[in-house]
Amino acid sequence: MSNEKTVEKPWTGRFTEPTDAFVEAFGASVGFDQRMYRQDIQGSIAHAKMLAHVGVLTAAERDAIVTGLTQIQGEIERGEFQWSIALEDVHMNIEKRLTDRIGIAGKKLHTGRSRNDQVATDVRLYLRDEIDVIAKELKRLQANILDHAEREADTIMPGFTHLQTAQPITFGHHLLAWNEMLQRDSERLADCRKRVNWMPLGSAALAGTTYPIDREFTARELGFDGVCRNSLDGVSDRDFAIEFMSWASILLMHLSRFSEELILWASAQFRFVEISDAFCTGSSIMPQKKNPDVPELVRGKSGRVFGALISMLTIMKGQPLAYNKDNQEDKEPLFDTIDTVKGCLRVYADMLGYAAQPDGAKKYHIVPRKEVMREAALRGFSTATDLADYLVRNGVAFRDAHEIVGKSVAYGVKTGKDLSEMTLAELQQFSDAIKDDVFNYLTLEGSVAARNHIGGTAPERVREAVLSARQRL
């Protein structure tokens, strides 16, 4: 990147001395905002077409601008473009190169707009494009989760509250809980996109412009749903970016929760799942170690995204209308959030996916240890609630049933027996309402099958929920 001081800035007419060299570098944003070059060129082409449409530019000038900008995009994508710190940002770098290529017509491009509404438009276009990419990756992750949930609809594991064994559930049901969170995230993202997709261009510096612009024409060219209805607001607010970053924080909170479970489940203490070597690393000193680095990194990156949101809120909280230089600081936390979200979704979707084998089989990267899960569900008296429900169905008041089961559990703790391992006589010492059919309800399979309603853990309902979720997806 060049930082030559001989470059003439577009605003130097009022100034009598050059910008301090350090201030020039300190204030430049081209080092990070150049990633928006496609959107900047896209917006400029639409603006040029609009100016020709209303008679401010000739058709020949419009065509020269469009051709020149298209060629500049090619230069950038081939790595031939020379970015200049002296020109401050992506907008002026491209405009200066355009003027060098096509002459006076290039200087006319900025008619009726300001860098204030130009950058606000670029950021919205860029974020809109990235939201579309993120939405696809989110759906890929959901699809892989649903694939697992369907395969594991009958796999029994303990459900937890307070990280203590609560009731038996199926692994498929647990995975569907993840999907429900992600489905809400998907819906929130689609809703966020609606507010991103409004066009600030035409707001100019802050008050609009005296030129006879046609903002609706430009909005149609750029695929916006409409135009920002107030010029002050259009150039100065970044709430659409804050909303996206709030959304990203919720998503990373969910992924962090998933990660915490995978980390626990992969430990020697749980041994519920085996994570493929492709998503783990070893230790430099302990040869036996297999560390779940991917879930740990995603869990850690949640803090990065939360921090970026706080940064953006802090940047905006004290700004008077309209545009202020503070807003240059909006892009790096936004860009970092976008990159982090895309990376986390990609690695999670891959980890929840599979590797195709030469024989056509699928080798899944996360595999449940079904017998270990089942054995864990047998510990902790996970069917205690089923016994209480059984007693209630046999005419016992719930509070009395609760006490009966509590005494039964205390007996089990003393004897080392689960409820399903006790004899009928042992159970009947606590209540004569217990009959020989009680064991139909104390088995793990009987417990999960009994939750046969919408949202329940019964395998039949899990499969129905997978089908419904795929249809929503």
Image (cartoon, helix red, strand yellow):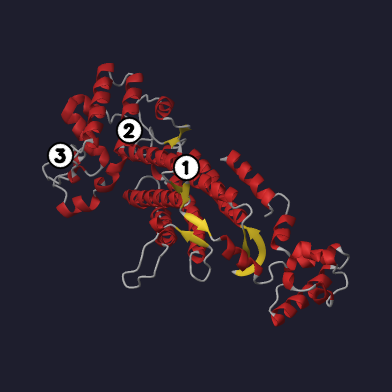
Give the Cα separation between the discs numbered 2 and 1. 32 Å
**Image spot of residue 177 (x, y percent):** 59, 54
How many other residues sit within 10 Å of disc 1, few (<14), some (14-19) or many (≥20)?
A: some
How many other residues sit within 10 Å of disc 3, few (<14), some (14-19) or many (≥20)?
A: few
Residue type at mark 2 is Arg
Residue type at mark 3 is Glu
Q: Which residue is mark 1?
A: 135
How many other residues sit within 10 Å of disc 2, few (<14), some (14-19) or many (≥20)?
A: many
The tag earlier along the polypeptide, 2 or 1, is 2
The tag earlier along the polypeptide, 1 or 3, is 3
Where 273 sits versus 97, above or below? below
Where 205 sits versus 434, above or below? above
Q: Can residue 26 be seen here?
A: yes
Residue in the image at 84% along x and 74% along y: 428
For the N terminus, the quadrant is top left
Q: Can you name the residue that lies furthest to the top here?
A: 59
Q: Which residue is mark 3?
A: 8
Residue type at mark 1 is Ala
Where 87 sits versus 429, above or below? above
Q: Can residue 162 be seen here?
A: no
Residue in the image at 43% along x and 58% along y: 298
